[in-house]
Amino acid sequence: MRVILFCHSLVSDWNHGNAHFLRGICSELLARGHEVGVYEPADAWSVANLLAEHGESALRAFARAYPHLRSHRYARGELDLDRALAGADLVLVHEWNGHDLVRRIGLHRKAHPHYRLLFHDTHHRSVTEPQAMAAYDLRHYDGVLAFGSVIRDLYRRHGWCERAWTWHEAADTRMFRPQPAAGGRRGLVWIGNWGDGERTAELHEFLLEPVRALGLAARVHGVRYPGHALQSLREAGIDYGGWLPNHEAPRVFAQHAVTVHVPRRPYVQALPGIPTIRVFEALACGIPLVSAPWDDCEGLFEPGADFLVARDGREMREHLRAVLADPALARSLASHGLRTIQARHSCARRVDELLAIYAELAPPRQPAREAPA
C-alpha cells in the first residue's frame, strides 16, 4: 500500500510534538512493507527555528537517528499534487497545513477517487480557535482522525466532517524503550516546552515549587522559555538544558529517577482524555511518572498503577518523595506503565487501528463509464 502524509514537519521536533508520533507511524508502516511518502513545506516554522538555534547539524542528527525516513520539502505554491499522489492508497493531511492546501487536496480527491483521504487533528484549536478549524474545507475528505474522542465529537457536532474516528497518539517503541542506567538514576527530569502561558501557574505548582521544597536535583529540557521562566528555574535550583532532540529522550530518562506530567490548561478544562505524547514516551522508557490532575475519561491508563496523580502541589511533593525513597514503588510504577504502553499504546497498535479504519471505509468511487456509442 502507498501511504502519503502531508504534515508541518517530519524532520524537526522543535516545539512540534506531532513529529514524534508521525515518525513512529511512518517507521511502523515501512517495517510492514508499505510505501510511505511525506511532504512538508520547506519554510516550516519548526525547521526555521531549529536551524536558527542549532544549525544544519540538528537535521543531520535526525537523519542519523532515522536513516529510513525521508521527507519531501516543497516550496509553497510549487507542490505538484498529481505527482505526489500518483498511485496513493491512503492520504493523511495534518491540521497544521494551510487552509488552501487542505482544500486543494480535497479537490484532487474529488477528481481522483482512487484513494482514501483523512484529516488528522492533534491540537486543541477545535476548542480554542473553532473559527479557524471550521474554515477547513473537508467536503471531499473521507473522515477525520482525532487524537481524542472529545475532538472527534466536535467534528461530528459542528458538521465539519461527516465521519470521524478517535486515533490517540502513542509511543514509538522502537525508539522509546528502557535503557541501561549507566552511573545510576538520580533526581527529576521534565521534558516539555514553556508555551504561551497555558500552564505557567501549573508549572510553578507541580514542578518548580516541589523541586525547590524537596531540594531535588532536577533538569528541564524544552524551548520557548522566556526570561522570567528561566529566572524561576534558577530560583528553584533547576538546571535548564534547552532543546533536546526527541530521539535522545530515552537516554535522558534513563539518567533520572522520576519525571512529571503537567498538562496544558485547555486539555484539563475543555478536552479531557487527551494526555501529551510525553506521557506515552516516558512510560515506554520505564521511568516512574507523577502527573498533575487530568481526566482520563477514555480509560487509557490505570492511575495509581501506571503513574501517580497529584491533586495539588502538596500531593506532588508527597508523591515525589515517596517514589524517590521507595525503590519497590518506583519499580512497580515503571514496570506497570511500560506494560500498558506495550499492550495498548504503541505506534504498532495505532497502525493496526489506522489500517482497520482504512478497511472500514467504503470502496472508493469509480469514475462513471461512458455509455457505448
Image: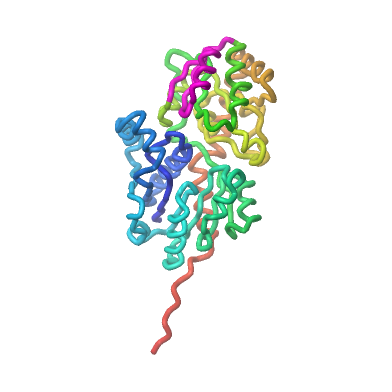
Colour scheme shown: rainbow
Image height of 214 relative to 141, above or below: above
Which residue ends up furthest to the bottom in the rendered image? 373
**Which residue reaches farthest front?**
227
Give the side of residue 199 with respect to residue 297, left or right: left
As drawn, is 217 to the left or to the right of 300? left
Task: Please count the marks in the image.
Answer: 0
Name the foreground residue: 267 vs 231: 231
Image coords of residue 82 (percent x, y)? 35, 61
Percent of width and height locating residue 336:
59, 28
User: What is the magenta range?
Assistant: 215-242
Q: Quadrant of the N terminus?
A: bottom left
Quadrant of the rendering where the C terminus is positioned: bottom left
Reply yes or no: does residue 221 show up in magenta: yes
Residue that lies at the very extreme toward the top in this rendered image = 215
Q: How far across and down, in percent of the image, does residue 371 sit?
A: 43, 85
**Residue 20 vs residue 238, the one in the foreground:** 238
- Left or right: where 315 falls relative to 146: right
Residue at position x 61%, y 47% from top? 151
> Would you place residue 115 above or below residue 5 in this image?
below
Residue 344 vertical placement versus 232 (above, below): below
Horizontal and vertical percent for residue 312? 68, 23
Please identify the quarter of the rendering in which residue 10 is found: top left
